[in-house]
Amino acid sequence: MTVLDRNTAVAGDVKDRALAEQGRSRIAWAAAYMPVLRSVRERFAKEQPLRGVRIGACLHVTTETANLMLALQAAGAEIALCASNPLSTQDDVAAALCEYGIPTYAIKGESNDVYYSHIEAVVASKPHMSMDDGCDLVTTIFTKHNHLLADMIGGCEETTTGVIRLKAMQKDGVLPYPVIAVNNALTKHMFDNRYGTGQSTLDGIIRSTNVLLAGRTVVVLGYGWCGRGVASRAAGMGAHVVVTEVDPRKAIEAVMDGYRVMPMEQAAKEGDIFITVTGNYHVVREEHFRVMKDGAIVCNSGHFNDELDLESIARIAKKKTEPRAFVEQFELEDGRNICILADGRLVNLAAAEGHPASVMDMSFANQALAAEHLNKHHKTMGKEVYDVPVEIDEHVALLKLASMGVAIDTLTPAQQKYMASWSEGT
């Protein structure tokens, strides 16, 4: 199946259009590892379930995201895309998407002002549907462009952080339209968050520092699906893993999984590498920086960089240097050095390439199918945060298994009857 010819390039704001050929090659490479999304795209091209729908997307602009955009384009949607993080953009991919006829506003390393100007450029396309990775697009539309809401049918959200913000809006009675929490699909968070974040976070740390993990004490702050993935991959590379948590149930699970669990006050003194994956505010603070070892490495793999109190480390340091790309080294008054990676932003996307395409295959298939579901059913949906329908989640899992050559059992009629009955006993 072909997409728009490169001569149909459209408006956008990218680093260098000359990078497009390289981006096209890398997009094609990722596509080879995304068979589920490819299957969805092929059906979309025939049925055009999103014809005439304008989609505003605020996502990490990567090779995997590009394949999602092309699937939505094949479905007949008109798309405008901007970055959901100033450091996660792959500039060659952004250039290639413009050549494919998708207005793209994303430059790796863009300033905060440019970041929000790019969101405004997407809002200017007057979308019918939002597709968010962190909820910045939804909140921008709600707070600054309320007049657009009358024509909007709904949205999709990709991240835990974004879902938390959307549920807060729902609780306050201000959620402007129905949103499907793609993050909550089992085929998303159990795999993307665990296996994707687990591998790509360590990839970002190793690429930026070339540090040996074996024998080091790695402190994982937060033991949700992302934390589980980071901890297991770090342990698998020989690290001594410590977990910090505020949820007693997750803390017990971490203990049962074989990790030491302790308060951050204690862990700050023991850790060599600190990785935040909480989605919360200032989980590494001044009192922690003050007791860390010389040479401690601190990074974040949650959506926003405010998991780290960056103002405090800058304030208590007497000197800052940048010895390597994506490494800021802060020298404290007593001569100790603490390294912050990737400006505290998602280290897996800022200092590496993010999740492997084979993991994002399921996440973005859910995203595409959720958009189709919204377009079909939005008139009967309230202004709530919805989980991905189970039938979509299961369909994605079956497609993934089929692509891997794996077959599973089905229930016999007798088993179905047994599972639906309450009268069977001992």
Image: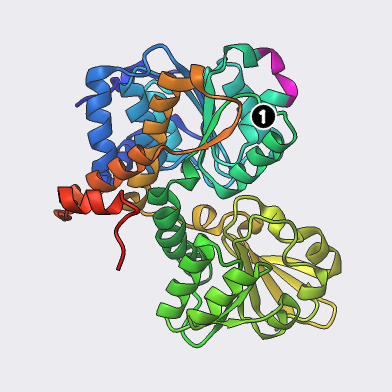
Q: Residue 122, position in %: x, y?
A: 57, 23
Q: Residue 222, position in %: x, y?
A: 61, 66
In terms of image quadrants, where is residue 388?
Answer: top left
Task: Return the residue nearer the eye: 333 or 171.
Answer: 171
In terms of image quadrants, where is residue 423?
Answer: bottom left
Q: Residue at x 28, y 24 (%)?
A: 44
Q: Indicate the secondary structure of the residue bearing disc 1.
A: loop
Q: Amino acid at mark 1?
A: Leu
Q: Residue at x 57, y 39 (%)?
A: 84
- Asked if the stretch drawn in magenta spans residue 146, the answer is yes
Q: Quadrant of the N terminus?
A: top left
- Asked if the stretch drawn in magenta spans residue 50, the answer is no
In terms of image quadrants, where is residue 13?
Answer: top right
Q: Residue at x 72, y 84 (%)?
A: 269
In the displayed structure image, the side of residue 298 where residue 336 appears, left or right: right
| Bounds of the magenta segment | 143-147
In the displayed structure image, the side of residue 30 where residue 291 appears, left or right: right
Q: Residue 114, position in %: x, y?
A: 66, 33
Overall secondary structure of the magenta stretch? helix
Label 1: few (<14), some or many (≥20) within 10 Å?
many
Q: Is residue 59 above or below residue 341?
A: above
Q: Residue 56, position in %: x, y?
A: 52, 24
In the displayed structure image, the side of residue 49 where residue 118 appears, left or right: right
Task: Return the residue nearer the eye: 412 or 163.
Answer: 412
Determine the residue located farthest toward the bottom in the rendered image.
Answer: 215
Q: Quadrant of the C terminus?
A: bottom left
Residue 316 visible in the picture: yes
Q: Is residue 278 above or below residue 108?
A: below
Residue 220 visible in the picture: no
Q: Residue at x 64, y 55 (%)?
A: 279
The residue pinned by badge 1 equals 175
